[in-house]
Image (spheres, rainbow, N blue to C red):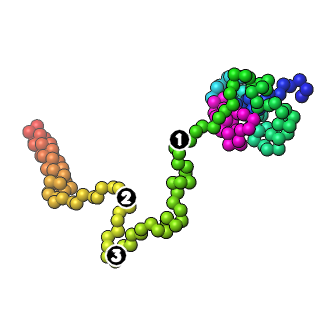
């Protein structure tokens, strides 16, 4: 389409030209969540913005298309580019929240082999694997706590009701 204006995919996703594929993917996901048309019912500009985001993603997610775009537009993704704008500074990766990386938390194979092991002796009770409290011991059950007390009470009440009915009919 000759009349169609090409937007800078780096500017659309808000990433610098030297952004890693992970940074591009994160920017695409963040913008897709924010501008998805299902979240903005009836908003034509949200659908248009989502179309631009997806076009930029299709260019920058494919290494061949990205290399072609970088060759055709050498100033794209830099602060001097037309769509980037002078007010935007390049995105810097966030500093880690901790100085330790995930790899330092993992034990090496030698540390795993050197770890003390617990061996159960024959006849030893196994350690429970859950944190549930132990079940309470059953207490002494009295007659009132058993089901027979309820049955006896029901029989007495029914007998009294039947007796009242019979007495009531006899006095008529």
Question: Does the segment drawn in magenta span residue 65?
Answer: no
Circle nearer the N terminus (1, 3): 1
**158 over 45 or under it: above or below:** below
Image depth: mark 1 or mark 3 in front: 1
Q: What residue does disc 3 label? A: 121
In this rendering, position of residue 36 left or right of residue 109: right
| Residue 152 visible, this orientation | no
SS assignment at label 2: loop
In terms of depth relative to the viewer, which is nearer, 66 or 105? 105
- The one nearer the camera, 105 or 31, is 105
The mark closer to the camera, 2 or 1, is: 1
Q: Which residues are magenta?
A: 15-37
Q: CA distance from mark 2 to mark 1?
A: 33 Å
From the top left corner, tell me how far across and down residue 5 is, in percent: 84, 25
In percent of width and height, residue 153 lies at 15, 50
Task: Report, in whole angstroms, how far the alpha carbon at label 1 lies from the one at label 3.
Answer: 45 Å
2 and 3 marks in contact (CB < 8 Å): no
* Label of residue 83 in the image: none
Measuring 76% from the left and 30% from the top, which residue is drawn there?
A: 78
How many neighbours does mark 3 have within 10 angstroms: few (below 14), some (14-19), or many (20 or more)? few
User: How many residues crowd around disc 1 within 10 Å: few (fewer than 14), some, or many (20 or more)?
Assistant: few
Q: Residue at x 53, y 45 (%)?
A: 99
Q: Which residue is mark 1?
A: 97
Residue lying furthest bottom: 122
Quadrant of residue 12 within the rendered picture: top right
In the visual, does 110 lie left or right of 14?
Answer: left
Task: Provide the secondary structure element on which disc 1 rests.
Answer: loop
Dominant SS of magenta comes to helix
102 left or right, relative to 66: left
> Which residue was labeled with disc 2?
130
């Amino acid at each position: 389409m000759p009349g169609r204006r090409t937007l800078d995919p780096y500017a659309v996703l808000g990433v610098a030209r030297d952004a890693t594929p992970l940074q591009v993917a994160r920017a695409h996901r963040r913008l897709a969540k924010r501008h998805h048309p299902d979240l903005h019912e009836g908003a034509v500009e949200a659908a248009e913005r989502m179309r631009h985001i997806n076009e930029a993603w299709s260019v920058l997610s494919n290494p061949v298309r990205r290399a072609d775009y970088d060759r055709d537009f050498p100033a794209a993704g830099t602060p001097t580019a037309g769509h980037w704008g002078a007010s935007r500074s390049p995105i810097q990766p966030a500093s880690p929240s901790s100085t330790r990386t995930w790899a330092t938390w993992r034990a090496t194979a030698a540390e795993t082999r050197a770890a003390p092991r617990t061996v159960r002796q024959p006849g030893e009770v196994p350690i429970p694997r859950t944190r549930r409290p132990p079940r309470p011991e059953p207490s002494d059950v009295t007659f009132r706590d058993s089901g027979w007390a309820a049955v006896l009470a029901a029989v007495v009440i029914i007998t009294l009701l039947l007796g009242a009915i019979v007495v009531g009919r006899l006095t008529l």
